[in-house]
Image (cartoon, rainbow, N blue to C red):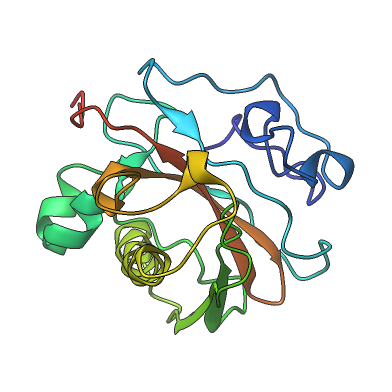
């Protein structure tokens, strides 16, 4: 993770996360150069910033399989595997990442394009001993809830529609988690319909 994300709270996203729909570009200045996915079918979900950045924030948390960099981890793996299984897949799975942040709970905001009309805020506790692997599992649980809500709802943007014949939970990859202050976070999520290749 070091060398990938800037320590500045105003440099939380890469240009490749942004789209014509996104308002993040005006709020956050991305450096260094954007990460590129090795899978040609993988694409970042365009998002808008849920709120202005304010203190206290914690460093962005990157999620990758062993021997990969900036590619993300399938949410399905966090959902179906035990923590022992996750430890064998996720780089830095046992890192205790929130111990010094003072954060006791995370308010995860999912700003998925076209679903702004549904409740996309999910709050869950994070003990000081929470590891990266455990955090990934908690995030996956919230995204499964979101996908269930979205599937039974309508969308204003059909290209990013969630449903059995569109984008599904099993196609989602967790790339990173960003802090916007006061426990409010957003996840950098990618969609890839191709089978997962873990490269470890």
Instruction: Tell me: 27 left or right of 86.
Output: right
Front residue (pair 111, 91): 111
Viewer-nearest residue: 161 or 197: 161
Query: Residue 37 versus residue 83: which sits nearer the camera?
Result: 37
Is residue 4 at least partly visible in the picture? yes
Eyeballing the image, is 130 above or below 28? below
Q: On the picture, is 148 further left or further right than 87? A: right
Question: Residue drawn at (71%, 64%), measured in percent from left and top?
Answer: 57
- Is any part of residue 70 visible from this angle? no
Q: Nearer the viewer, residue 42 or 77?
A: 42
Quarter of the C terminus within the rendering: top left
Q: Residue at x 34, y 25 (%)?
A: 68
Q: Is residue 54 above or below residue 121?
A: above
Residue 95, given in percent of the width and then of the height, sits at: 37, 56
Give residue 53's position: percent from left, percent from top.
81, 61
The answer to whether residue 160 is above or below residue 152 is above
Please say if 58 is above or below 48. below
Report whether 10 appears left or right of 122.
right
């Amino acid at each position: 993770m070091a060398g990938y994300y800037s320590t500045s709270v105003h440099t939380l996203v890469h240009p490749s996360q942004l789209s014509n729909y996104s308002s993040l570009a005006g709020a956050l200045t991305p450096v260094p150069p954007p990460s590129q996915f090795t899978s040609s079918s993988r694409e970042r979900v365009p998002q808008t910033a849920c709120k202005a950045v304010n203190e206290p924030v914690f460093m962005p948390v990157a999620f990758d399989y062993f021997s990969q960099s900036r590619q993300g981890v399938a949410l399905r793996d966090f959902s179906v595997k035990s923590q022992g299984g996750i430890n064998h897949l996720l780089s830095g799975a046992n890192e205790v990442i929130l111990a010094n942040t003072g954060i006791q709970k995370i308010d995860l905001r999912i700003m998925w394009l076209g679903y702004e009309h549904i409740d996309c805020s999910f709050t869950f506790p994070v003990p000081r001993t929470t590891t990266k692997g455990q955090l990934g599992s908690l995030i996956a649980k919230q995204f499964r809830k979101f996908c269930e809500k979205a599937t039974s709802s309508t969308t204003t943007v059909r290209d990013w529609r969630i449903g059995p014949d569109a984008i599904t939970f099993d196609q989602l990859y967790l790339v990173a988690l960003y802090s916007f202050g006061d426990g409010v976070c957003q996840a950098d999520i990618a969609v890839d319909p191709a089978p997962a290749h873990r490269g470890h």
